[in-house]
Amino acid sequence: MAKMISELLIEDMTPEERERAERVESILPTLAERAVKTDREGKFDPDNVRLLGEAGLLGLMVPREYGGLGGGLRDWAAACFAIGSVCPSTGLAYFFHNTSASRGTLALAALDEGLFSAEEAPGVRAFAEKVLYTMGRDRKWLANYASESVKSEHSAITITTEAHKVEGGWELNGEKSFGCATGIADQYLVTAGLQGINDASALCTFFVDRDAPGTRGRIEWDAMGMRGTATEGLVLEKVFVPDDAALAIPGAFARSCQMSRSSFVGNQVAASVIYLGAAVAVYQTAIKMLKEKTFVDTGKPIGTGPFQSQFVGDMYADLQTALLWARRQIQIESCNPPMVSKDEVVTFWRTCKGQIAEYSFNVGVTALKAAGTSGTMFSTPYSRALRDLAMGLVQAFPAERGRLEAAKLIIEGREQNSFGKG
């Protein structure tokens, strides 16, 4: 049986995981065909949403009882890795869609753990199931908006978007700096702080329709890489959200996040392996070229040349290093029973993200050197990979910040707060 690309990352798939991975594998050729145009035009391709939906993959992380595929972190990472090998932009947008499921699954886990009162429980359950049914049974694409451009010293993400009570629901005002699929997703999940509460317990989650009055993109996304993600952010001006589309219970967001196996909502390694998938693809492209292209005088593959051989060794070592970091993070974050403490999972993740990004980027740099000047043309696999891989150096947080956070955890037993209210 031929190996799927995702098996380079997840080497011991169960039969159920393999079935889910085969769904992803089946759409890779189509995504690959569209990827050059997506990158060139810098636009998210809505046909990719339909493609993922028809494959049943919009519910990858949704439990089966809600119409999903019942996948876990291993499935999520395998899918993002595979999609990243052909179209990293679609991989990143798909990652953020899947993060929405955590708003349902973590809330249900918190209910089971008794973190909500009997009075709160019905509202929490209704909202969690709304999220999961929307993604699973209804096969809708969700965009997840938490990040904002404002900074504070003590919190990684400071939320200034505010919700205040109005008749029949809530009014949202604020600006989200980052989030894929603006104008593409069927609905947005928006994190906002309740008016009158000045700490992280204010943070709550709201469903916002894509075409709701008062919503618009924040910027035109025209980045050097990951160009087809519609990462335009979101501006909300007097946006009305009805009561049944809001989980506006003080502390609900924070209590749900306690159920994560890692920091915040966990599963962030599934984003990093998108870049790793891109690194695998450009490595394979470079190796194929170095094997097939020959010296005109000897007929030997140019990969046998002395400095070309150095490129091969460097790419191989860097790629394997990134793979080892990713596999370890997936292992300690998904194994049952847990093999290490949550603190160790978090510490490892803070370092792991940067290691995957930097070693993957190194693969792209070396592949470009091997390709030579012709590889720098804008739409070549080498140019595209290098631009996309550069985004991994800064997306979410750079390696330097991750290592500093790991140092705090190791020495002081604490890291920066994930969220705060501004």
Image: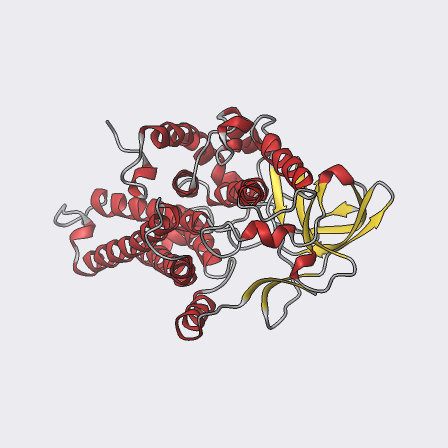
Which residue is painted at 73% across and 56% down in the image?
A: 161
**In the rendered image, the vertical position of residue 395 relative to residue 91, given as above or below:** below
- Quadrant that contains the N terminus: top left
Task: Report if residue 131 is visible in the image.
Answer: yes
- Quadrant that contains the C terminus: bottom right
**In the rendered image, the vertical position of residue 64 relative to residue 376, given as above or below:** above
Which residue is painted at 49% across and 36% down in the image?
A: 61
Residue 8, image x, y percentages: 29, 42
Which residue is painted at 62% across and 51% down in the image?
A: 253
Task: Report if residue 211 is visible in the image.
Answer: no
Q: Nearer the viewer, residue 251 or 243?
A: 251
Q: Most extreme residue toward the left, as rendered?
A: 298
**In the rendered image, the vertical position of residue 241 relative to residue 403, given as above or below:** above
Left or right of 294 on screen, residue 159: right
Q: How many labels does the image show?
A: 0
Q: In which quarter of the image is residue 314?
A: bottom left
Left or right of 409 on screen, residue 175: right
Which residue is painted at 42% across and 68% down in the image?
A: 406
Residue 321, image x, y percentages: 28, 57
Left or right of 420 on screen, residue 1: left
Q: Most extreme residue toward the right, as rendered?
A: 167
Residue 239, image x, y percentages: 80, 46
Q: In which quarter of the image is residue 106?
A: top right
